[in-house]
Amino acid sequence: MPVAVVIVLGVLIGVVTGVLSSTVGVGGAVVSTPGIRALGATPLEGVGSTLPSILPSAITGTIRYHREGLVYWPVVRRVVPIGIVTAVAGAIASVHFPGKGHVQQILTALLVGYTAWKTSRPPTAAQDATQATVATTFPIPTCVAIGFGAGALSGFLGVGGGIFMVPTFRSWLRLGLKETIATSLACVGLLAIPSTLTHIAEGTINWTFALPLCLGVIPGAQLGSRWAIRATDVQLRRLIGVGLGVLAVGYLLGETIALAR
């Protein structure tokens, strides 16, 4: 495929990635990874090359959410430190893990499917009753556990860790859906930094794919966060369930076929 075509399509993929990232709070690599794989990226490049675009997307969306008072910064401060450590470990493990990146892609598909199912479900009456009290405590052990898992997945899968934080912020910390998306996006951006630096050092980032994504995600994140703030919880749950569900199925089928070849 000509480089010029790859660049143009990469920017367009970046726009879609930015919209999903700021709307769902998962980092957007669940779109950009299969996107650049279709453009010719290897499985390991698919893991590493999406990471540089996570930071500008997360910053753009987080600024918008912060203005609306939706980011829970105490959660960010408790989740991110341990996540930075495990993100580096996950990135190193990703490069040296058997399967040449295909296993990571399949695991990503499964986690995306879980996030779609878990987050799209309406809250129970008990969850609504406890949300206000639990959401003001943010237990440190719980936040550390979330940060540990999110960081490891950020580095290992190149997806920013949001596919773990979104369902756990909802289930474990009882955050509202919009607060979950906003807070996850803030954490995603910070966790992407050590993951990106590690993958740069390991040589798994192809900048022919990475730079166009970085250009596209900024306007996409602005559009996505603007819509998410105005949307109802029901609309957001439907988007998460349908959008991520379709991605998970396509992701899993494509990578399973590639692995079997």
Image: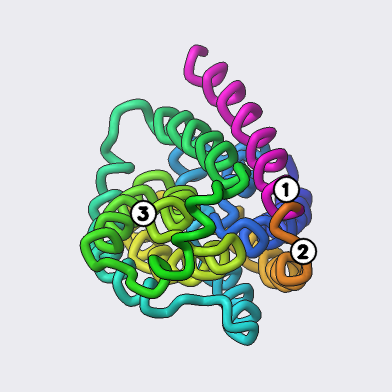
Type of amino acid at the residue the image marks with label 2? Ala
Regarding residue 48, the answer to whether it shows in the image is no
In this view, the mark in front (3 or 2): 2
- Nearest the camera: 171 or 57? 171
* Label 3 packing within 10 angstroms: few (<14), some (14-19), many (20+): many
Please give left or right for residue 141 compared with residue 11 in the image. Answer: left
Residue behind mark 2: 231
Q: Position of residue 137 (x, y in %)?
A: 33, 72
In the rendered structure, are the residues bearing label 2 and label 1 in contact, judged by CB atoms less than 8 Å apart?
yes
Q: Which mark is residue 22?
A: none
Tell me which label, 3 or 1, sits earlier in the chain: 3
Q: Which image quarter is the N terminus in?
A: top right
Task: Identify the magenta region.
Answer: 235-261
Type of amino acid at the residue the image marks with label 3? Ala
Please give left or right for residue 256 compared with residue 247 in the image. Answer: left
Residue behind mark 1: 239
Tell me which label, 3 or 2, sits earlier in the chain: 3
Residue occupying image coordinates x 71% and y 64%: 216
Type of amino acid at the residue the image marks with label 1? Leu
Residue occupying image coordinates x 75% and y 61%: 232
Q: Which mark is residue 150?
A: 3
Q: Is residue 4 magenta?
A: no
